[in-house]
Image (cartoon, grey):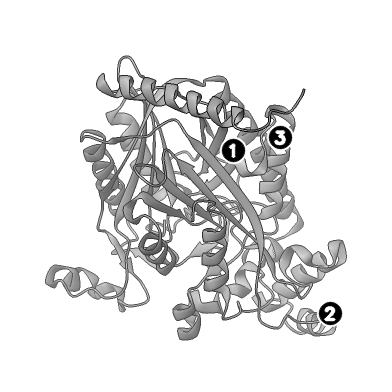
């Protein structure tokens, strides 16, 4: 086809934009913004046989039952130009980049979706199954007998099939929709680095003496039928560890209870949860089912209040961007050092990490785990829903257990409460400390890296590298 030159393409574009704005304004007069399509679906991913649980190293046996089912959910969005985005949420502690890659490859083959059109978020419940040998592998998989290892691997393969299927169902359900956004508030998250001992938290809370940064925003995205106004789906987030429970029963923890409560209050709705930058945030106090239910109810109430309030309409525009950056690591160990650790620490976590890293080096030189002296291939995505500069949502997806400093900084540097920052997305490879937390050290500052299998501490440039990548993905800045 012959390429158009000169001003004609600009005039055609201006005419199209003008017509679209006219229609959008006309729709606003009736309380609607036309052009969106959306579809949502859910499926159960609760293991059906005894399987090792993820999140805590102290467990000595597989799960023994369930308090709630675990779910995989999908929300498909399509804007007025036909551009699609697919959000997948999982009631799991996390997934690794290999598993995410297999899911995305299958969705590319079956639905033509590009990598930047897919976001995979995990709730980080510590009452779900171990998933594969890479996510928290030195804490779990590399310590288990061959039978349990095989069961974990088999579950991961089944998970891929279920996620691809539920994503396809959501895409098939795409239909005209009204999409709106807002932000509520819930206050049960506590900065766990700044408030110890934990048993003093209720007293400090009552006196208003809790310390440290927190993010109590509850971002809410609603999807409604454009004619009846019936709620078809709601996507919401919160920055807090899902660690109320630690027993031997499957459970979605407080995010699972919150999703169930929202769905119960809105029959026919699919409620999806994404975890914010809660790497250093805990629900305190904790350790009882009643508390998990209570926090879930409080979060659901914050969501419901927003749903019942006037929410901003989102114009039918969707832009999705994704890239993997080289997140800088400090000096990584060589083969001889790893072999020595593996031989000397047969039963410990350091030895398990060494065996894991040697296995990865043998497969591909260790590039996927940061052993090639370049850095870890860290995922960063930025989505814009609506008009970014006016009423749209600036949705940032970050991998790993990101500490709250990132959300607070990105909100400050971008669009305030309209900047939504998800952690635990696309790849959960380690904690992601800010420069402050890295220098302070402790568990989130690097002590936890051994359990994830990261070969070294993060370099001091980690925060600036990630934040810089977020800004670079935004063409309007």
The numbered disc on residue 48 is 1
Residue 438: image location, x then y, percent: 50, 80
Alpha carbons under labels 1 and 2: distance apart: 39 Å
In the displayed image of the protein, which residue is found farthest to the front?
6
In the depicted structure, whether residue 57 falls above or below residue 272: below
Alpha carbons under labels 3 and 2: distance apart: 36 Å
In the displayed image of the protein, which residue is found farthest to the top?
227
State which quadrant residue 338 falls in: bottom right
Q: Secondary structure at mark 2?
A: helix
Report the mark closest to the observer, 1 or 3.
3
In the displayed image of the protein, which residue is found farthest to the right?
362
Q: Which residue sits at x=26%, y=35%? A: 307
Q: Is residue 417 left or right of residue 209?
A: right
Report the mark closest to the observer, 3 or 2.
3
Among the two numbered marks 1 and 3 on one chain, the one whose residue lies closer to the N terminus? 1
Please give the residue where the numbered disc 2 appears in the rendered image.
335
Q: Which residue sits at x=72%, y=49%? A: 153
Instruction: Out of 440 and 17, give the one closest to the viewer.
Output: 17
Report the mark closest to the observer, 1 or 2.
2
Q: Is residue 205 left or right of residue 393?
A: left
Q: Is residue 126 visible?
A: yes
Please give the residue where the numbered disc 3 appears in the rendered image.
108
Q: Which residue sits at x=49%, y=85%? A: 439
Q: Secondary structure at mark 3?
A: helix
Q: Is residue 40 visible?
A: no
User: Number of marks in the image?
Assistant: 3
Instruction: Out of 454 and 331, give the one closest to the viewer.
Output: 331
Q: Which residue sits at x=56%, y=43%? A: 320
Residue 49: image location, x then y, percent: 61, 41
In the depicted structure, whether residue 459 falls above or below residue 19: below
């Amino acid at each position: 086809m012959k390429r158009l030159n000169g001003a004609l393409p600009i005039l055609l574009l201006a005419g199209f934009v003008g017509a679209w704005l006219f229609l959008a304004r006309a729709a606003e007069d009736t309380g609607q913004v036309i052009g969106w399509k959306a579809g949502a679906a859910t499926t159960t991913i609760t293991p059906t046989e005894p399987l090792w649980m993820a999140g805590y190293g102290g467990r000595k046996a597989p799960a023994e039952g369930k308090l709630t089912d675990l779910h995989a959910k999908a929300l498909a969005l399509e804007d007025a130009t036909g551009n699609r985005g697919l959000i997948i949420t999982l009631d799991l502690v996390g997934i690794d980049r290999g598993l995410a890659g297999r899911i995305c490859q299958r969705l590319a083959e079956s639905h033509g979706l590009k990598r930047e059109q897919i976001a995979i978020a995990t709730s980080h419940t510590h009452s779900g199954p171990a998933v594969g040998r890479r996510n928290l592998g030195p804490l779990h998989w590399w310590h288990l007998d061959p039978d349990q290892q095989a069961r974990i691997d088999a579950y991961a393969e089944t998970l891929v099939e279920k996620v691809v299927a539920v994503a396809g169902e959501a895409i098939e359900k795409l239909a005209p929709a009204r999409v709106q956004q807002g932000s509520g508030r819930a206050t049960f998250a506590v900065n766990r680095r700044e408030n110890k001992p934990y048993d003093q938290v209720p007293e400090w809370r009552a006196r208003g003496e809790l310390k440290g940064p927190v993010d109590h925003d509850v971002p809410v995205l609603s999807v409604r039928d454009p004619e009846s106004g019936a709620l078809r789906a709601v996507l919401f987030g919160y920055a807090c560890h899902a660690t109320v429970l630690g027993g031997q029963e499957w459970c979605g923890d407080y995010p699972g209870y919150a999703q169930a409560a929202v769905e119960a209050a809105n029959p026919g709705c699919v409620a999806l949860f994404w975890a914010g930058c809660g790497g250093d945030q805990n629900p305190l106090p904790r350790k009882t089912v009643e508390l998990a239910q209570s926090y879930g109810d409080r979060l659901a109430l914050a969501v419901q209040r927003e749903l019942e309030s006037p929410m901003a309409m989102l114009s039918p525009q969707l832009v999705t961007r994704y890239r993997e950056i080289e997140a800088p690591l400090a000096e990584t160990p060589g083969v001889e050092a790893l072999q020595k650790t593996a031989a000397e620490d047969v039963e410990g976590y350091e030895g398990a990490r060494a065996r894991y890293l040697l296995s990865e080096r043998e497969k591909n030189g260790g590039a996927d785990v940061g052993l090639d002296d370049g850095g870890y291939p860290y995922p960063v995505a930025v989505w814009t829903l609506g008009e970014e500069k006016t009423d749209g949502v600036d949705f940032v997806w970050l991998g790993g257990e990101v500490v709250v400093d990132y959300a607070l900084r990105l909100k400050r540097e971008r669009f305030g409460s309209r900047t939504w920052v998800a952690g635990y997305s696309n790849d959960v490879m380690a904690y992601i400390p800010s420069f402050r937390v890295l220098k302070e050290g402790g568990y989130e500052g690097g002590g936890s890296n051994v359990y994830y299998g990261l070969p070294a501490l993060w370099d001091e440039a980690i925060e600036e590298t990630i934040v810089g990548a977020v800004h670079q993905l935004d063409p309007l800045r």
